[in-house]
């Protein structure tokens, strides 16, 4: 079971309403186990989480967070704002999408990894049950994301590491 550095979660923790707004904006449904995780461990840093994929290992630096602008936490969490999912996705949205005409999210980054890659949910054919993958930042091109399968679900991923 994954362990986390005490006190590393970003406060205030997101409320259900903030998660629902993001789901609507991204046009996806977050998996229930992930919602429960982020409501308790928003942006937390794992103590040690090396993830194997494609014959390599890469450690998770920090899970991404959801900051709720309505909660007034932007000023208090300026450093953590760099790890907000929307902030992370903004400059690389074309590299996360599968075509120019798609709306909503195809690949949702959920954790920053040590070499510039991201642990992510892949939603292409998954609906509310996305698979967990590593999105390779360096190998991906515009509308040509490169991903590596890690686990069939968030729950499976968390039980392994």
Image (tube, rainbow, N blue to C red):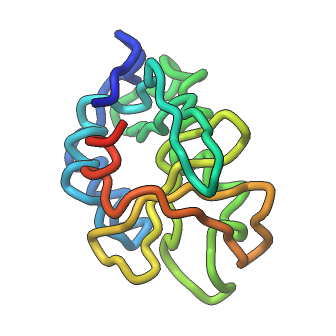
Quadrant in which the C terminus is drawn:
top left
Residue 8 image offset from top left, x and y in percent: 42, 16
Q: Is residue 132 visible?
A: yes
In this rendering, the answer to whether 107 lies above or below 88 is below
Residue 35 image offset from top left, x and y in percent: 25, 48
Q: Is residue 121 left or right of residue 86?
A: left
Which residue is at the far front? 55
Given residues 26 and 3, the one toward you in this image is 3
Residue at 31% across / 59% down in the picture?
Answer: 153
Q: Is residue 44 left or right of residue 129?
A: right
Quadrant in which the N terminus is drawn:
top left
Which residue is at the far bottom? 101
Residue at 78% across / 62% down in the picture?
Answer: 139
Residue at 66% across / 33% down in the picture?
Answer: 114
Q: Is residue 69 visible?
A: no
Residue 122 image offset from top left, x and y in percent: 47, 68
Given residues 120 and 94, the one toward you in this image is 120
Residue 110 image offset from top left, x and y in percent: 47, 47
Given residues 113 and 87, the one toward you in this image is 113
In this rendering, the answer to whether 71 lies above or below 7 is below
Q: Is residue 155 left or right of residue 7?
A: left
Image-quadrant location for residue 136: bottom right
Picture mark count: 0
């Amino acid at each position: 079971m994954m362990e986390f550095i005490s006190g590393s979660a970003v406060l205030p923790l997101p409320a259900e309403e903030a998660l629902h707004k993001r789901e609507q904006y991204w046009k996806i449904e977050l998996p229930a186990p992930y919602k429960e995780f982020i409501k308790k461990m928003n942006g937390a840093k794992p103590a040690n989480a090396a993830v194997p994929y494609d014959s390599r290992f890469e450690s998770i630096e920090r899970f991404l967070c959801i900051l709720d602008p309505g909660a007034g936490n932007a000023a208090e969490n300026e450093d953590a704002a760099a790890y907000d999912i929307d902030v992370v996705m903004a400059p690389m949205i074309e590299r996360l999408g599968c075509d120019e005409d798609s709306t909503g999210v195809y690949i949702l980054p959920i954790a920053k990894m040590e070499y510039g890659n991201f642990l992510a949910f892949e939603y292409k054919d998954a609906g509310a049950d996305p698979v967990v993958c590593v999105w390779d930042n360096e190998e991906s091109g515009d509308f040509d994301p490169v991903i590596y399968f890690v686990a069939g679900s968030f729950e499976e991923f968390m039980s392994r590491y």
